[in-house]
Each structure stands twice: as structure tokens, then as C-alpha cells.
Amino acid sequence: MPGQRLKSIGVWCYAIVLYGFIFLPVGVLVLFSFQDGRLPIMPFKGPTLKWYEAVLSDSRLMDSMINSLLVALSSSVVAVFLGFLAAYGLARSYLPAKGFQRALLTAPLTVSYLIIALGLLIMFNALGVASSLWTIGIGHVVINTPLCFAIMYSQMGDHQITIERAAHDLGASDFQTLWLITAPMMMPSILASFFLSVTFSWDEFIIAFLLSRFDVTLPVEIWGMLRSGLNPKTNAAGSLVFLISVGLLILAELLVFRKVKKQ
Amino acid sequence: MTATVEIQNLSHRFDDFTALSDINLTIDAGSFAVLLGPSGCGKTTLLSVLGGFISPTQGRVLLNGEDVTHVEPAKRATTTMFQDYALFPHMTLLANVGFGLRMRGQTRRARNDRAMEMLTLVGLESSANKKPHELSGGQRQRVALARALAVDPDVLLLDEPLGALDLKLRRQMQDELKAIQRRVGTTFIHVTHDQEEAMAIANDIVVMNAGHVEDTGSPESIYLSPKTLFSATFMGETNVLPGRVTTINEAQVMIDTSLGPVSTFRKSDVNGDIVVGDTVQVCFRPEHVHINHPATENLQSLGKATITDHAFFGSHQRCQLLAADNQHYTAHLPQTSPVPRDADVGLMVDRGSIVLLKKTR
């Protein structure tokens, strides 16, 4: 019995350390966003909402947040669209060197964002394309398309082939089958890759930093704030970013995983 | 609607495997035909060719005399009921059944009315707004049938649709399929490897083996006078006794076998090509075997035999008999007849039910 007890204490300690390790940094960040003082350091004084007020009334910060949302949503729509068509094409048709093509499509997942950003930067310079939200968006499509492709390709099962056949058999054209049958059947993985893609784009820094100029995204703006030293306002901005990420997660849970469970 | 299906000189190869070789077949309009054969015999490939999912290497498929060999499934007057039902998981039953009509540009109201009518036909009208995952296997089956019939096809192709159901449900669905087929009058072509299922539902059975057609005909004719040994052994059980024809006269054929001389009635329609000296298989079904029966004109004696095994099957008793040639023969004896174990019995067979098959392959 004492052995059992010791074991359960051990398990509890392990769990506390593990969760602490993962969530303490975020906890500290959120906690000191309520700091009633000029520095986000111990001891905690407060709470106050004045830093949130400062964030929400900072037009540069708010603009960058809107930029981030714009880039995240639109680049994800494009990435999901491209990834879906690639997955469909690869899963359903006879293509030369299928395995190689699949590897080629997923290869960018293994390349560091820095390399991708540098490549894009050099290319845009050579083409004379000025850095803007568009270039950031293109960068995010580049990094998210392979991810979306990989998720959706893994979910294109053979059992769906008969279902698509049945649709053809009942008179549907290829496009009708894709739009009315395949896409709705794939909806859980389409949504999953969309939300994952939005989350990745939302807090992506390196590409956004290297490919932006006047209009910047939120991570770049926060980085700019950090250069002038630690400040509870930065914590408040970070907490908002975190809050929105959590919101996305909950939305994905409600929309995607509930659906999967039901089916 | 309904249509005659004609298959002419059809062959299909997958790389270097011949799945179908030179098939010629006519299936009458409004009949319930069953393609019967062991797995790998090409029956599903043939069905896919009929449905338009496979373009055959050679030959033609005619629907009501019109060549549809290379017409795509969407433009063909056939629909398929798939083995795993292939219902659209994200749609209600009503939308599933109405899908084909939606593709034909019918208004929502018209197609919903028709879909409801089809769901009523299969007894699922109260579940119209459910999704497929809320249904049992047998119910999904019915939805698949309703969906395939909703577009009023000329020919309905059924790809082993009852394979996944338990025995009781399968029997029930067989009866339902038959009743529905009679009601709608569409030509049904059903694929199965289960000979009992074939006999339960078919007007016409097409026995297939290794890519070619072995035998065609009504269940009775295939069972009682099979044209090949494969057909005889696949459609139910049969005893095979090899022999050589010694005499043929107007009424009888005499065969010399390992169990002595056997004489059968001559059936000119089926035995037309048998001549004296041919090596033949004398085939008789277990239920045509009798033991210790007083000799009559219609019984052929096969000498003495010993019962080595015996089991009670309810409607009959199944016995294994060891005959004088050291071979085992199967008999189905009446429920109540005495079965003397390990004693010599007289082995007899109904002369009229003997089938003579020329050894070909």
C-alpha cells in the first residue's frame, strides 16, 4: 500500500510539472498583462485593465491585428483550396511518378521558414514585387499548402471512391461530384486544415517580418514593441493573441471534431 | 422502364490477366438475372462493364439494341447498387434518394415527391430526414435500392448487395428484392457467389467460371440438367461417377462405370452430342440416392455400399457412403428413414435424374 501511494504521488507530481512546464509561461504572460505598474516583473500588483485599454486604443497595434486576420483568413482559404485540389488529383487519378509528386508537395514542410522567406524575398526582389500584405499572404500560402495537402490527402480514403462512383452513376458530372459529394464528405479535414492553417499564419513571424514593409502583421508589431523593452502592454497584446488562438481552437473543436464524432 | 441487355463477344484483360473471355449473353427485358460464380470468376468485372465503369478490351454491350459499350456511367440507363451501399453520408435519406433526379435537373418538389415515393416502396418513409449513419445495415441496403431505382433506370445492377447481412435478414431482403423487381419491372442483374441466393431470386441464372459463361438458364434447368461439370458442382452438391458410353439406343444410354454398368434414359436435347466410346461423367444429386429400396424400372443399382458417416439436417439426413470402387458418395435420405451404420446397404439412384456430362476440360 505505501508503494501504491508513493506511486500515485509520483504520478501527480509528474502531471503538475508537465502542465506547469507547458502552461506556466503563458500563465505568467497573461497574469502580468494585468500588472498595475510599469514593468511586467514580480511582485504582482493589480489587477488593472489599463494595458488592455492601451492596446485597444493603439491604432498601429489594432491595424496590425486586422492585417493579421486578413492575411490568416485569406491565405488559409487559398492554401486549403490548392491543397484540396492537389489531394483530390493525386488520390483519384493516374499520375506519373505519384510517390515523387506527393513527396515534392509535402517537402516544404521540412524546410525552415527562414529559408522559404529568404527565397521568396530574393524572388520578389528579382521580379520587382514590393513587399506588402500580399507578399506575406503568398508566403503563408507557400508554407500552409503542403500542410493542408498532407491532412486532406491522408483522409481521402478508398471507401469514398465507391461513393463518388455512385454519384457519377446517378448522372453527376466530375465537377458536381467534387462539389456536392467529395468536398462535403471531406468537410472535417477541410475545416481541420483551414483552422490549423489560420493558427499557423496568425502567429507566424519570420516570413511576415522579412516580407513586410509598411503594413505589418501582429507578431511583427509585437516584436517592434519588445525592442523598446518589457512592458505590460506587450503582455496584454500577447494575451489577446493567445485569446484569439484559443477561440479558434474552440471553434475548430465545435465545428470539426463534434462532426467527426457524430459520423 | 426496362431493357434487354445483350453482350456480344465481350472480353476484358487487366494487364496480362484475362478477366472475361468471349462472353455472349442475352438477358431479357424485365427479368431478374443472377451472375453466379466463385470469387475471381469475372462476374463483378462483367457488372462493371455493364455499368460503364470499365471499358472492355473487346466486344459490345447493347441496351435495347443500342450500343452503349463506351458510354460513361452518368449517361447510361443503368444504375448500380454497390456492395457497400455507397450512400452519401452527409445527406438525408430524402436527399440521397433524390440525388439522381437533382442531377437530371428536376425541381426540389418533384424530386422530393419521387424520393418519398421510393422510400415508401422500401418501407422507410418515416426515416426520410435521417442520415445514413443512423440506420442499420438492412435499412441502408433499402435506401441504396430506392436511390438506384428513383431515376427509373432500364437496368439495375446489384453488386453482391446482400453479402454483409446476416442470414435471416438476407432471406428477407431476397424476398423484398424479388417483390420490388416484379413491381417495377426493371431488368435486374444481380451478382452473387451464393447459389442458394441465386435460386431464391433469379428467373435466369448465368453460371460463370474463370472469365467465361459455363451455363445459363432457369434455376430448375441449371440444377436438374446442368450443361457442365462446373455448373453441376457449383449449383448444389453432386456425385460424379466417371464412365464410358458403351451403347446408345432410342430410349437408353448404357455406360460402363467403376460401379458396373449403368443405364439412363436418353435425353436427346441434352445428350445429343454423346456417342459410343465417349468418356462421360455420370452425375446424380444426393437427394436422388436411395438405399435398400426394392428394385424398380426407374432405379439403377450401384451395388453395395457402407454408410461411413451420417448427420441429421432437419429436413433430411445426410450420409456418406463408401461404394465398391472405394469412393465416397453423398446421399440425402428422408428424415425418418432408418440408417444402418457400418452395414452393407444397396445403393440405388433415380435413373431419370442422372445427368451425363461429356468430359471436356
Image (cartoon, rainbow, N blue to C red):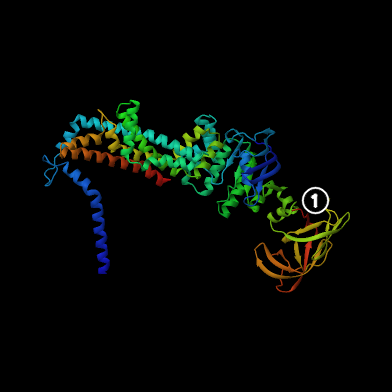
Instruction: Judge left or right: residue B89 versus residue B208.
Output: left
Residue A32 coordinates in the image, percent (x, y): 16, 43
Q: Nearer the viewer, residue A118 or A206?
A: A118
**Please, what is the three-letter code of the amino acid marked with disc 1?**
Val
**Which quadrant of the figure contains the N terminus of chain B?**
top right
Instruction: Judge left or right: residue B77 versus residue A180.
Output: right
Q: Where does label 1 land, which residue?
A: B270
Residue A59 coordinates in the image, percent (x, y): 20, 29
Residue B161 coordinates in the image, percent (x, y): 58, 47
Identified at 27% across, 60% down, the residue is A11
Instruction: Judge left or right: residue B287 versus residue B73.
Output: right
Instruction: Give the residue furthest to the bottom.
Output: B343
| Chain to which the residue tagged by mark 1 belongs | B
- Does dot 1 land on a helix, a strand or a loop? helix
Count the marks: how many?
1
Instruction: Give the residue furthest to the right.
Output: B249
Q: Nearer the viewer, residue B184 or A14?
A: A14
Placement of A210 over or under B288, stated as above or below: above
Instruction: Judge left or right: residue A63 versus residue B352.
Output: left
How packed is label 1: few (under 14 Cα within 10 Å), some, or many (20 or more)?
A: some
Location of residue A239 (image quadrant): top left
Tell me if I can see residue B230 in this picture. yes
Q: Nearer the viewer, residue A192 or A167?
A: A192
Tell me if I can see residue B130 in this picture. no
Residue B283 coordinates in the image, percent (x, y): 76, 58
